Amino acid sequence: MGDRKDIQFEAESFAKLYPTWLYPGESERDPTSSSEAPFTAQHSLNSLDPVGWRKAAARISRRGPGVAVIPAWTFFLGPALGTIARYLKRHGLKVMMIVHNAADHERSLWKSRLSNWQLAAADGFVVHTDEVAHDLRKAGHTQPICVIPHPIFTDFPEAQHTLPRRGRLELLCFGLVRHYKGVDIALRALAHPGLEGVHLTVAGEIWEGEKDIRALAQSRALDGRVELVSRYVSDVEAAEYFVRCDAVLAPYRSVSGSGVLAVAQHYRRPVIAADLPGFSGLIEHGKNGWLFPTEDEAALARLLRDRVSRQSAQALGRNIAGELSDGGWREYADALIAFANGEVNERFRPPGSS
């Protein structure tokens, strides 16, 4: 929103996002990122401090903003963000929520109740895919929904090309390793015959199934072709992994949206993904990536053997470069503001509705 002179933007953020028992990683912040921002930001919230939630809400209310934009992505923050949202609504503020996940990937009744309690406090939702919009309606939320595709990231650093490619094909799985992301599916697929020249880097802290992931990666069938970078990866280091790879691999079991897809597009790398609605609406098979049947390791192995090569990945990368626009985030902000101000109607309709 930096070039919108009619908008004053301020941020309230977390000093402590997750307790240690819930966040097994080493860091919640990128130590290489700049601390300077073109807006005022206060880091005071603690996810386990209800008194702090109310103080933050009161502080926001006193500043008198027209719209509060609150994220919704995990059940754990539902109590904190839902409390703040309700306080602001009682004091006359409109509350818009950017919903990354309508429900947790590992669903349960109590997690859904925490997420829905936060979501119920919104005046409207902004989502990145139709799938998330459908999930909100299925959960009974009737507020207006605006679907705005996730823009391409533009502020990631340029790579210095410090990592040489290996074998005939270099792949990357990026981000926190959790069961729903299907890294084990990728490892079993790579063990199939005919893929001996394919290398894979798994870059991100392993939160779930570490013993099994390491056993698969170190198996004789993979013969040292898998590199596990099980730690926080900064933006600077991530640039090197994305530029080294020929394609990004996303063998998820479930997905509502993916920031990794936006990073891959920034670096002009095609994505090989499971044919879930959250991917199939964004990836056109054979044009900007490839799709394979969800949880089908044999199909993934065939795709890697028969269709995906360094040359074909480079060709798709050129297609992605031709589609990129540097106005994505500005357009995103403009659409969100127009939706919040009631200047545009709801941009989502369930199938079969008029």
Image (tube, rainbow, N blue to C red):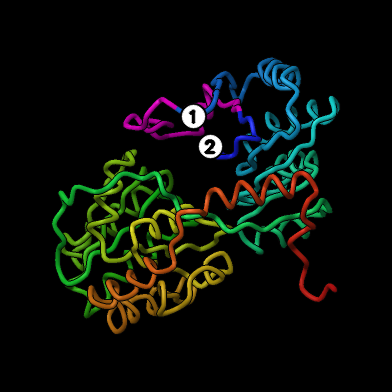
For label 2, the residue is: 2
Is the residue 28 above or below the residue 226 in the image? above
- Dot 2, how many residues are within 10 Å of its Cα: few (below 14), some (14-19), or many (20+)? few
- Could you tell me which residue is drawn at 62 percent across and 50 percent down? 101
Outermost residue toward the front?
A: 5
Q: CA distance from mark 1 to mark 2?
A: 7 Å
Say left or right for 282 vs 64. left
Give the camera-side residue of 29 and 343: 343
In magenta segment, residue 26: yes
Q: Amino acid at mark 2?
A: Gly
Main SS of the magenta part reads loop
Q: Quadrant of residue 277?
A: bottom right
- Dot 1, how many residues are within 10 Å of its Cα: few (below 14), some (14-19), or many (20+)? few
The C terminus sits in image quarter: bottom right
Q: Quadrant of residue 205?
A: top left
- Could you tell me which residue is drawn at 39 percent across and 30 percent down? 27
Magenta segment: 10-36
Dot 1 or dot 2, earlier in sequence: 2
Counting from the top left corner in percent of width and height, residue 239 is at 29, 48
- Could you tell me which residue is drawn at 39 percent across and 44 percent down? 155
For label 1, the residue is: 38
Question: Do callouts 1 and 2 mark residues in contact (Cβ within 8 Å)?
Answer: yes
Is the residue 305 above or below the residue 136 in the image? below
The N terminus sits in image quarter: top right
Q: Amino acid at mark 1?
A: Pro
Is the residue 318 above or below the residue 12 in the image? below
Counting from the top left corner in percent of width and height, residue 146 is at 71, 55
Question: Which secondary structure lies at badge 1?
Answer: loop
